[in-house]
Every structure is written in structure tokens, then in C-alpha cells.
Image (cartoon, rainbow, N blue to C red):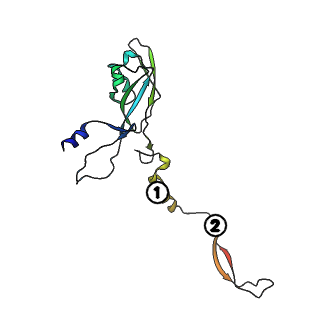
Amino acid sequence: MEMKDKVLKSGHYLFDNKPLIVKGWTSEADMKKDTITAVPVWIRLHKLPLKFWGKGLPKISNFIGKFIKSDLATEEKTRLNFARVMIELQVNQKLPDKAKFKDELGQLIQIEVEYEWKPVTCEFYKGVGHETMHCRWRKQGEKKKESKVIRKEWRPVAKKATVKVPVPGTTTTGVVVEVLEN
């Protein structure tokens, strides 16, 4: 139980730079999927002046999402071509490619934002995990709508019937033909 609590409280887990949702289990636990509204994502902030890599980094990151932490290379300033931070994004929020802010002198600073992973969302059920075009719930809803549609146009219906029609050159009758009825 102690290890379980430690794992649950340790923070955010990622697998292949994608969030891994971990939740506790008991024999009474509800096995339904939780609705995910926010996910942790690593971002890279390019062209960020070095003077903002300290206490300013969380404030700048909060323009995009909720700051969680920065990586070790960013904290120690051993990689200077970009700052790498983990932020929490709302699944349905717009993801900007650039962040703009003014420095202490009033100069406009514009930095490029690169997402190591972007959440894939479904507009139909407002969740994470697949795109709208691949949503099985949307497709099931469309099938139900189609079955309720009443056709208002006239279409002939083909029915098979046995009709005694003399066939030229033979003595055969009783050929099966399609008869259209309305």
C-alpha cells in the first residue's frame, strides 16, 4: 500500500512523451474511464533570452498552460538552444505556436513554442485519445439517425414474381422476371 501511494503521489508519468494516466485500484473501484480534461505535455521554448530561464520561466510558461516543472538541462543551463518545460494543457484549448510578452523595459519578446506531443481530441464526445473522424460513438450516432430518416421520394421497389410469358421459339412459359411496383 505504501508503494502504491508513493506511485500515485509521485506526479506525472509519460511513456513515449505521451501522458500515462495512473489511478489507484481496489476491488470496489469503478472501471469506467475518467473524463480527462488536462494532460501534461513537454514543450520547448525557442529563442527565449537567458535572463528569463530562472524565476521568469514558470510565468512565461503559464501563458501557454500551467507550469509543472523544467528539465534538468534547463535548470542547470547546460543546453542553451531551447528551454524545456512540462506544462498542463486543457485538452480542448488552442495551442499557440508563439508566445509574446513584454520584458522589464517594455520591449516585445516573441518566442517559438514547440510541443513534443499534442493531445489528440474528439470534438464529438470532448475527450482525449482519438480524432473526431475515427470516433466510434459518432459513427453509432450517425447510424441511429440514418435509421430514423423517412424517405420522402418515390422509388420503385423490385419484387420477383413468376409470370407466365411465352418465350419466342420455345414452348416454355413461367419465366421469372422482376416487376417494379411503387
Circle nearer the viewer, 1 or 2: 1
Residue ID for mark 1: 140
Residue ID for mark 2: 155
Q: Nearer the viewer, residue 129 or 166?
A: 129
Q: Residue furthest top?
A: 105
Q: Quadrant of residue 18?
A: top left
- Using the numbered discs, state the Cα–Cα distance from disc 1 to disc 2 in whole angstroms: 27 Å
Residue depicted at x 44% and y 41%:
120
| Quadrant of the snapshot with the C terminus | bottom right
> How many residues crowd around disc 1 within 10 Å: few (fewer than 14), some, or many (20 or more)?
few
Count of marks placed on residues: 2
> How many residues crowd around disc 2 within 10 Å: few (fewer than 14), some, or many (20 or more)?
few
Residue depicted at x 21% and y 41%:
3
Q: Residue furthest right?
A: 169
The numbered mark, 1 or 2, whose residue comes first in the sequence reads 1
Residue depicted at x 31% and y 36%:
12
Q: Circle 2 sits in a helix, a strand or a loop, which is it?
A: loop
Q: What is the x, y in percent for residue 165?
A: 73, 83
Q: Circle 1 sits in a helix, a strand or a loop, which is it?
A: helix
Looking at the picture, which amino acid does disc 2 mark? Arg
Residue depicted at x 47% and y 28%:
97
Q: Quadrant of residue 69?
A: top left
Vertical relation: 16 (above or below) 43? below
Q: Residue furthest left?
A: 2
